[in-house]
Amino acid sequence: MNKKKPVRERYTGEIDYLYDALFPETNIEVTKIDNFYDELFPESSASSAVGWVPATLEFVDGNRQKVAGVRLFQPAADYFTLRSEVGAEEKPLPLIRLCCLRMAAMPDDFPDVEPVSSQIEVIETVDGRSHQAYVPADQNLETGFFGCSVQEAAPDRYLFFPHCNIKLRYLRRYIGEILVEKGMIDNLIFHRALDEFQQLKKQKLGQIIAKQANILNSVVEREIQKIYRQNITRFKVGEILVATGLVSEEQVKAAMAVQEKIKKQRIGTFLIEKGMLREEDFFVALAEKFRTSLVDLRQVGISRKAFNCVPREVALELQILPLNFKNSGLVVATMDPDVPSVREVIARHAGQQNIQFVLALPAHLKAAMKKLYMQPA
């Protein structure tokens, strides 16, 4: 990203030409040039109001307010200062009150957000809104991150999102694209597996029963259609097959359990079970998609203060492990970052709005939780 030039520097070339025209081959004092610049670009003009950017504020409670200007990270790193009108009194507000800050331009002290070098993210905030924005990866601000709306005609296109009020953020890319791009799986192998996975998802219960019971699918379909042709629709497929003596109730229950597993299964788990993908590779790609990091719980220190933030029963039910505090946020290990409701439950019990998820391998997370939660008091 290219660093945005200060206002004075952006106009230097134009002033040089103007100076040459007005004062050809003439010596003039530096202070006179400064005064001349101030007259051309007075401090009251929008272009020289250094640090102030017109903006729209989107608050946590759902309200919106358009203001004449804002200055980020003043008077402190977790604050911003606003002016409701030009020349109005400055008013500081904490960033925790905002879900999104929409700006007409990037602040002078920060680099431009360039769509060509950024990836599109979906950002869901706690006020229920969903945003799509170009977000550069190389940002390390403690309080939030910048983005640029995908809507080119948006009046306040430049965005700032405080970390504390983000419900979910992820790349607008399929996990398969990331896996193929990183060379974790061959493109042809992935698409063949995807076709198989999609066909598996379309299986009806009768087909699963036939496969589990080692019966021809045509036999199962014939018995089902025989009942339906008699306009008897009150029976379920499993009940019909049990009544005809083709299968037992236990076989139907087993098939229903398989069907439920298939419904919940995701492509990553399918690829791992088929031996086409390493579990660690999948979680590396998953971490990239959800803009977080993969941690090795065998090498991570756990803060007792953080650990005690969430009751044991809640942690076991959600399959999460509080680790420590970072940038005023509670860092929590999970193996599934795609469940926004989990964040809300943790925030409610921990009394901490800023929840930062990191990924952990299932085996490592389960081992750590067993060691920390299952030991007798």
Image: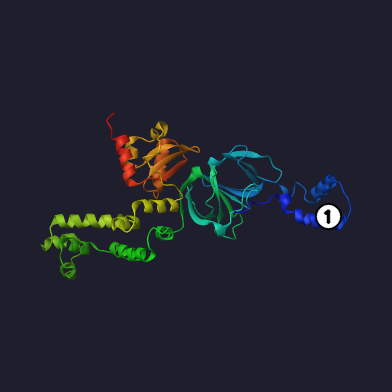
Residue 99 visible to the viewer: no
Q: Position of residue 252 (x, y in %)?
A: 17, 57
Determine whether, in the image, residue 352 is placed left or right of residue 152.
left
In the rendered view of the protein, which quadrant contains the N terminus? Answer: bottom right
State the SS at label 1.
helix
Q: Is residue 147 left or right of residue 31?
A: left
Crowding at dot 1, Cα within 10 Å, few <14 / some 14-19 / many 20+, comes out as: some
Q: Amino acid at mark 1?
A: Tyr
28 displayed left or right of 196: right
State the scheme by which the image is colored.
rainbow
In terms of depth relative to the viewer, which is nearer, 144 or 252? 144
Q: Which residue is mark 1?
A: 19
Left or right placement of residue 65 versus residue 355 in this view: right
Q: Is residue 84 above or below residue 191?
A: above
Q: Nearer the viewer, residue 158 or 91?
A: 158
> Residue 280 appears at what percent x and percent y?
36, 51
Residue 271, image x and y in percent? 32, 58
Q: Residue furthest top?
A: 377
Give percent across and percent down for residue 166: 48, 46
